[in-house]
C-alpha cells in the first residue's frame, strides 16, 4: 500500500502576520513597495470614527463586536457534534412522509416542488396548476421508493404567453404549442410554449421578450434565455470574471448532475446572447436610445456608452461658473488629471481562433478607440523609437519580448482620470509589440480632444520625462488639432515610478515638489489594472471584437462602482487630509522658528522651479554638490569647539564659580566613567595610566569643592560623604539639584537652586545645539566617505574620524540628559517644557541628499530639530550646514503646501460630483418628458431619480462636511 499522504491544510492567513507594506504589481511585472498615501487607495479604509450624533434623533449605533479570529479547527470542533443531525435531516427530506396521502382533488399526493417554500404534496395536475406563474421550478415525484426529478412540462405544463401564464383562448387549435428550451438560473428546462393569437397579433419573438425571455435566435426560435439568467451571469462575470463557458457548464450540472452531457448544450447561443445583453444594458443606461448627446457637452464623444467621471472638470457642465477667473496659484482646484499607463496583462492571442466575420458591438463608443481609425494611424508612424535618456525606463527599453509570444495584441495603453481612477471614454488602445509612444499618443490625443476647453490639464505617465520631449513634434504630424491643448499640458511621474528615475527626473517631475498638485499620487492606474487583469485569462482567447466588447463592459462596470462610492471617498480623503495638514503645518511652523530668520526670509523669495545649472537640474529641494567641508575641516572645527567649551566658564560670582566647578566635576566624572567603560575588563596599561591620572585630577578638584562647601554652606555638613579616590567618579556632589524641593528649602538652598536651574537650562540648550551640529557633521562626513574615500589607508582614517564623531554625538546626548535630569529635580515642568527626554533612537538627521525615499514625507523629524531660540546670535552657520537646513525647510514647506492644496481641491471635487448628478437628473427628466414610448419614459424617470439620489448624497457631504450622513445605499440600476 502506498503511504498515505498527509492532507494539506490551507490555514487561514494569519491576520497578525500581514506585511506592513503592501506591494503593487507594476504593469511591467516588477513589485514595488507602496507608499502609505497610495495604500489608502488600494485598500478599503476601515470606517472612520464619526463624531457623536445628537442623542435625541439618532438611533443608537449598534456596538461593533470586537473581531475574534478563530482558527478553522475551533469552528469545526464546534460544528462536528451536529454533523449527525444535519445528515439525518438531509436524508429525511429524501423520503415522502405520508406516501398514501391524498391531494385536495382526491388523487394521490405524490408530487412536490423543490423550490417553493415547504411545498405541500399535490398530484401532478394540481402542481402544474400551482405553477402557472412559476414555470421554471423543479418538481419531484414519489415513485414508491424515492423521488424522481421532473420538469413541469413533462407533467403537462404549457407556458401561455401574454395571458399571465394562462393559455390564449384565440389559439386556432390544440397543436398551437411549441417545444422550447429555456435556460434559467437553476438549469436548462425543456418546456412547451403557447403563443398568443389575439389581434393585433404580436410577433412570437416579441412575445418572448415581453415575457422576459431572450430568444436564442430570431428566426423561428426554439430556445431562449430568461432575463434573470442573463442578469445573473452578467453580474457574476463582472464580479468574478468567470468565463461564460464555466457558468454554462455549471447550469448543466444544476440540471443533471449525473450525466450533465445529456443536457442540451446551448453554450454558443448563450455566449452570443450574453455579449449582446451586456452591450444593450450599456446602451440602455447611457441614454443613447433617447439621443442624449444633444443635451450633453459637445466635447463628449458622440454615441458614447461610457460612464464618465462625475468629479473631473467638464466645462459648462459640472464646473463652477466663474472657474476661468481662478488665479494661477489656485489652478489645482480646476485642473483635470490624466494618468496614462500601459498594461501587459490584457493580451490577445492570434492564429486559429480569429473569426474574419467578427464584429465589435461597442464600436469605439466605450473605452477603446475606434479600431479601424486607430489601425490606419498605426500604419503612418515609423517603427523606430526615440532613444531614452533617463535610466531604468522599463516600459520602453526593458520589455521581455518572450512574454509576447503568440500574441497579436501584447496589452493595452489607457488614459484614466488620475484622481478618481475611472477609465476615460475613448482613452484605451491596443499595444502591438510592447509599449510605444505612438500608442500613448493616440490615446492621449483622443482624451485631449474631449478636454480642449479646459485651461489646466495634467498628464502623469511613468515615462513622462521621455515621452514629452518630442510630443509636440509628433502631435503636429499626427494630431494637429490637439497641438494647442497639448502645449498647455503639465507633466509628472507617479510617486512610485519616479523612484526608478534619475535624480534629475525626481526634482523635475515628482508630484511632491511640483506646485498645484495636491496629494495626487499618480499611481491610480495601477489599481485599475490589478482588478482589470483578472479578465485577462478569459479575454485572451477571444476574437478581436468580442475581446473589446468584454473589456469595455468590464471597464464600464469598474467606472460605475467608482461613481457609486465617489462622494464618500472624497469626503473621507478630506477628513484624512485635514488631520495630516495640521501635523505638517505645525511641523513646518516649528521648523521655521528654529531656523535663522534672515535665511528664511531669503528662502521665501526663491523660486521652486528646477533650473539647469550646466551639469544637473538644480532645485531648492536638492542638496548642492558636496564640495566641503572635508572630513579634515569638520574634524578641525570639532576640536576648535571643544577648546572653546573648555574656556567658556568665566563666572563672576563665587557661587557661580562654585556651581560651575561642580558642573565641570560632573562632566569629568562622566568622562571618567566612559573611559572605564571603554577600557573593558582588561584595559591596557596605557589606559589604566590615563584613568589613574583622571582619578587624581578629579580627587583634587573634588577636595577643593568640598572645602568650599564646608566653609560657605555649613548647613550641608551632615550630608557630605567622605571622598575616596577609588570611587571618585561615583561621589554625589550635593548640588542643589541633588536634594528634594523640601530639603532645599530646609537647607536654605533656594536661591542657589534657582541659579543652578538657569545654568543647567543654558547647558541643556547648548547640548542640543551641539548635538544638532554634531549630527549634521557626522552626516556630511558619512556622505563624504561614501563619495570620496577609496582604499584601505583612507578608509581606516575616515573610520577613526567617523567613530570620533559618533562618540561626539553620544557625548552631546549624555550632556543633555544630565542637564535635563538636574532640571527635573529643580522643578522643570516636564509636561509643558520644550526640553523633552532624548532617546538614542532619536539622534539622527533626515537624509536630505537623497531623492526622497518612499513615504519619507510621512516621517516627522525628532523634536529637537524644531527647538527654537537655539541658534546662537552672530554665529554664522557654515554654508553646507545652511544648505542642509534649507533643503529640510523647503521639503517641509512643500509637504505642507501639497496638503493645503489637497484641502482646496477636495471640496470642489465634491461640488462637481453634485453638479454632475443634478445635471444628469434634470437631463433624464427632460428625456422622460419627451418620450413617446411609455416604458422609455418610466425608465428615464427612474434614472432621473437615481441621479437625484446620488446628488443628494453628495450634497449631504458638502453641507455637513463635519458630520457625514448615512452610508450610500446600493443603487440598483436596471
Ligand atoms: Zn414551486
Ligand atoms: Zn390534485
Ligand atoms: Zn391571446
Ligand atoms: Zn475623475
Ligand atoms: Zn525619468
Image (cartoon, rainbow, N blue to C red):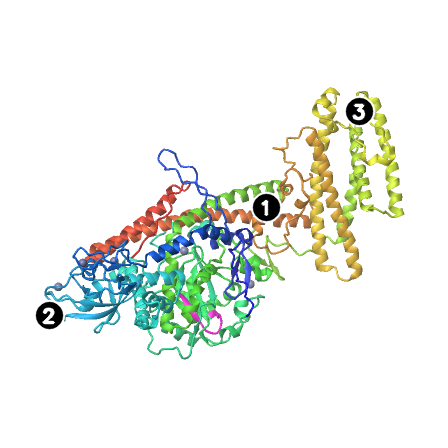
Circle 2 packing at 10 Å, graded few (<14), some (14-19), many (20+), is: few
Of the two numbered discs 1 and 2 in the rendering, the one whose residue sits closer to the viewer = 2
Q: Which of marks 3 and 1 is nearer the N terminus?
A: 3
Give the foreground label among 2 and 3.
2
Image-based side of 326 in relation to 624, left or right: left
Residues in magenta?
427-437
* Secondary structure of residue under mark 2: loop
Q: Is residue 679 positioned above or below 466 on the image?
A: above
Q: Residue 673 lies in magenta, yes or no? A: no
- Between the C-alphas of marks 2 and 3, the distance is 126 Å
Task: Determine whether the residue tagged by mark 3 lies in a helix, strand or loop.
Answer: helix
Camera-nearest residue between 501 and 255: 255
Q: Can residue 309 be seen in this view?
A: no
Which circle marks residue 959 in the picture?
A: none
Of circles 3 and 1, the one toward us is 3
Q: Mark 2 points at which residue?
A: 173
Q: How crowded is mark 1: few (under 14 residues within 10 Å), some or many (20 or more)?
A: some
Q: Are marks 3 and 1 in contact (CB under 8 Å)?
A: no
Q: Regarding mark 1 in the picture, which secondary structure is present there? A: loop
Residue 400 lies, in percent from the top left, at 54, 72
Q: Is mark 2 within 8 Å of ligand 3?
A: no
Amino acid at each position: 500500500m502506498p503511504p498515505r499522504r498527509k492532507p494539506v491544510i490551507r490555514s487561514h492567513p494569519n491576520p497578525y502576520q500581514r506585511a506592513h507594506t503592501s506591494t503593487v504589481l507594476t504593469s511591467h511585472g516588477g513589485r514595488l513597495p507602496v507608499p502609505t498615501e497610495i495604500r489608502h487607495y488600494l485598500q478599503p479604509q476601515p470606517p472612520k470614527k464619526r463624531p457623536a450624533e445628537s442623542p435625541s434623533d439618532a438611533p443608537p449605533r449598534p456596538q461593533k463586536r470586537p473581531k475574534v479570529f478563530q482558527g478553522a479547527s475551533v469552528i469545526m470542533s464546534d460544528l462536528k457534534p451536529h454533523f449527525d443531525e444535519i445528515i439525518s435531516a438531509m436524508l429525511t427530506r429524501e423520503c415522502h412522509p405520508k406516501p398514501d396521502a391524498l391531494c385536495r382533488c382526491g388523487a394521490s399526493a405524490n408530487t412536490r416542488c423543490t423550490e417553493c417554500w415547504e411545498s405541500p404534496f399535490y398530484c401532478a395536475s394540481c402542481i402544474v396548476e400551482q405553477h402557472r406563474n412559476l414555470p421554471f421550478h423543479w418538481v419531484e415525484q414519489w415513485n414508491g421508493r424515492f423521488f424522481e426529478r421532473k420538469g413541469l412540462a413533462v407533467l403537462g405544463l404549457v407556458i401561455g404567453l401574454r395571458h399571465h401564464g394562462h393559455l390564449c383562448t384565440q389559439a386556432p387549435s390544440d397543436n398551437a404549442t411549441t417545444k422550447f428550451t429555456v435556460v434559467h438560473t437553476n438549469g436548462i428546462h425543456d418546456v412547451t410554449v403557447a403563443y398568443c393569437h389575439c389581434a393585433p397579433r404580436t410577433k412570437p419573438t416579441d412575445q418572448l421578450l415581453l415575457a422576459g425571455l431572450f430568444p436564442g435566435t430570431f428566426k423561428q426560435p426554439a430556445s431562449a434565455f430568461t432575463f434573470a439568467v442573463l442578469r445573473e451571469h452578467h453580474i457574476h462575470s463582472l464580479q468574478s470574471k468567470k468565463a461564460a463557458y464555466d457558468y454554462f457548464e455549471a447550469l448543466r450540472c444544476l440540471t443533471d448532475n449525473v450525466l450533465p452531457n445529456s443536457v442540451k448544450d446551448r453554450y454558443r447561443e448563450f455566449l452570443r446572447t450574453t455579449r449582446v445583453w451586456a452591450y444593450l444594458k450599456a446602451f440602455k443606461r447611457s441614454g443613447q436610445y433617447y439621443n442624449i448627446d444633444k443635451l450633453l457637452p459637445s466635447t463628449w464623444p458622440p454615441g458614447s456608452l461610457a460612464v464618465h467621471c462625475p468629479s473631473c472638470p467638464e466645462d459648462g457642465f459640472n464646473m463652477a461658473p466663474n472657474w476661468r477667473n481662478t488665479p494661477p496659484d489656485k489652478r489645482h482646484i480646476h485642473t483635470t488629471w490624466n494618468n496614462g499607463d500601459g498594461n501587459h496583462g490584457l493580451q490577445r492571442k492570434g492564429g486559429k481562433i480569429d473569426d474574419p466575420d467578427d464584429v465589435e458591438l461597442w464600436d469605439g463608443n466605450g473605452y477603446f478607440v475606434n479600431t479601424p481609425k486607430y489601425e490606419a494611424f498605426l500604419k503612418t508612424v515609423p517603427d523606430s523609437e526615440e532613444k531614452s535618456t533617463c535610466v531604468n525606463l522599463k516600459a520602453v527599453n526593458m520589455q521581455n519580448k518572450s512574454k509576447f509570444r503568440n500574441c497579436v495584441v501584447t496589452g493595452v495603453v489607457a488614459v484614466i482620470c488620475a484622481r478618481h481612477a475611472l477609465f476615460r471614454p475613448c482613452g484605451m488602445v491596443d499595444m502591438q509589440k510592447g509599449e510605444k509612444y505612438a500608442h500613448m499618443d493616440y490615446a492621449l490625443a483622443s482624451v485631449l480632444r474631449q478636454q480642449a476647453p479646459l485651461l489646466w490639464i495634467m498628464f502623469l505617465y511613468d515615462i513622462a520625462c521621455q515621452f514629452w520631449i518630442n510630443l509636440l513634434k509628433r502631435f503636429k504630424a499626427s494630431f494637429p488639432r490637439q497641438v494647442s491643448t497639448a502645449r498647455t499640458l503639465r507633466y509628472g511621474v507617479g510617486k512610485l515610478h519616479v523612484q526608478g528615475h534619475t535624480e534629475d527626473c525626481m526634482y523635475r517631475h515628482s508630484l511632491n515638489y511640483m506646485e498645484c498638485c495636491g496629494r495626487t499620487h499618480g499611481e491610480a492606474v495601477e489599481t485599475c489594472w490589478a482588478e482589470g487583469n483578472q479578465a485577462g485569462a478569459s479575454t485572451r482567447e477571444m476574437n478581436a471584437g468580442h475581446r473589446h466588447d468584454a473589456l469595455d463592459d468590464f471597464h464600464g462596470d469598474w467606472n460605475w462602482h467608482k461613481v457609486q462610492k465617489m462622494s464618500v471617498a472624497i469626503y473621507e480623503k478630506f477628513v484624512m487630509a485635514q488631520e495630516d495638514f495640521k501635523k505638517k503645518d505645525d511641523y513646518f511652523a516649528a521648523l521655521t522658528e528654529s531656523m535663522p530668520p534672515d535665511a528664511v526670509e531669503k528662502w521665501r523669495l526663491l523660486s521652486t522651479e528646477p533650473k539647469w545649472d550646466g551639469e544637473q537640474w538644480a532645485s531648492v529641494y536638492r542638496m548642492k554638490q558636496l564640495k566641503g567641508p572635508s572630513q579634515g575641516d569638520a574634524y578641525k572645527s570639532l576640536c576648535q569647539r571643544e577648546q572653546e567649551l573648555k574656556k567658556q566658564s568665566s563666572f563672576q560670582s563665587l557661587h557661580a564659580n562654585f556651581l560651575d566647578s561642580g558642573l565641570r566635576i560632573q562632566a569629568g566624572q562622566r568622562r571618567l566613567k566612559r573611559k572605564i567603560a571603554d577600557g573593558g575588563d582588561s584595559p591596557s596599561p596605557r589606559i589604566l595610566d590615563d584613568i589613574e591620572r583622571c582619578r587624581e585630577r578629579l580627587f583634587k578638584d573634588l577636595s577643593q569643592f568640598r572645602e568650599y562647601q564646608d566653609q560657605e554652606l555649613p548647613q550641608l555638613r551632615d550630608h557630605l560623604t567622605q571622598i575616596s579616590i577609588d570611587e571618585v567618579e561615583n561621589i554625589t556632589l550635593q548640588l542643589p539639584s541633588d536634594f528634594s524641593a523640601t530639603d532645599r528649602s530646609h537647607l536654605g538652598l533656594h536661591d542657589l537652586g534657582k541659579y543652578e536651574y538657569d545654568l543647567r537650562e543654558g547647558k541643556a540648550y547648548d547640548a542640543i545645539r551641539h548635538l544638532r551640529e554634531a549630527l549634521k557633521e557626522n552626516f556630511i562626513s558619512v556622505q563624504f566617505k561614501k563619495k570620496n574615500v577609496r582604499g584601505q589607508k583612507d578608509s581606516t582614517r575616515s573610520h577613526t574620524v567617523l567613530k570620533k564623531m559618533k562618540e561626539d554625538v553620544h557625548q552631546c546626548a549624555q550632556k543633555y540628559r544630565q542637564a535635563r535630569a538636574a532640571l527635573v529635580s529643580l522643578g522643570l515642568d516636564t509636561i509643558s517644557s520644550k526640553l523633552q527626554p532624548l532617546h538614542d533612537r532619536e539622534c539622527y538627521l533626515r537624509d536630505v541628499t537623497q531623492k526622497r525615499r518612499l513615504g519619507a514625507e510621512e516621517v516627522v523629524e525628532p523634536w529637537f530639530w524644531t527647538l527654537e531660540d537655539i541658534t546662537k546670535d552672530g554665529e554664522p552657520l557654515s554654508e553646507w550646514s545652511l544648505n542642509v537646513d534649507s533643503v529640510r525647510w523647503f521639503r517641509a514647506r512643500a509637504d505642507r503646501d501639497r496638503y493645503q492644496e489637497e484641502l482646496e481641491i477636495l471640496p470642489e471635487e465634491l461640488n462637481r460630483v453634485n453638479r454632475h448628478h443634478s445635471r444628469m437628473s434634470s437631463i433624464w427628466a427632460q428625456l422622460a418628458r419627451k418620450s413617446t414610448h411609455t416604458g422609455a419614459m418610466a425608465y428615464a424617470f427612474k434614472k432621473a431619480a437615481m441621479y437625484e439620489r446620488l446628488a443628494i448624497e453628495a450634497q449631504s457631504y458638502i453641507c455637513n462636511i463635519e458630520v457625514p450622513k448615512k452610508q450610500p445605499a446600493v443603487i440598483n440600476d436596471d
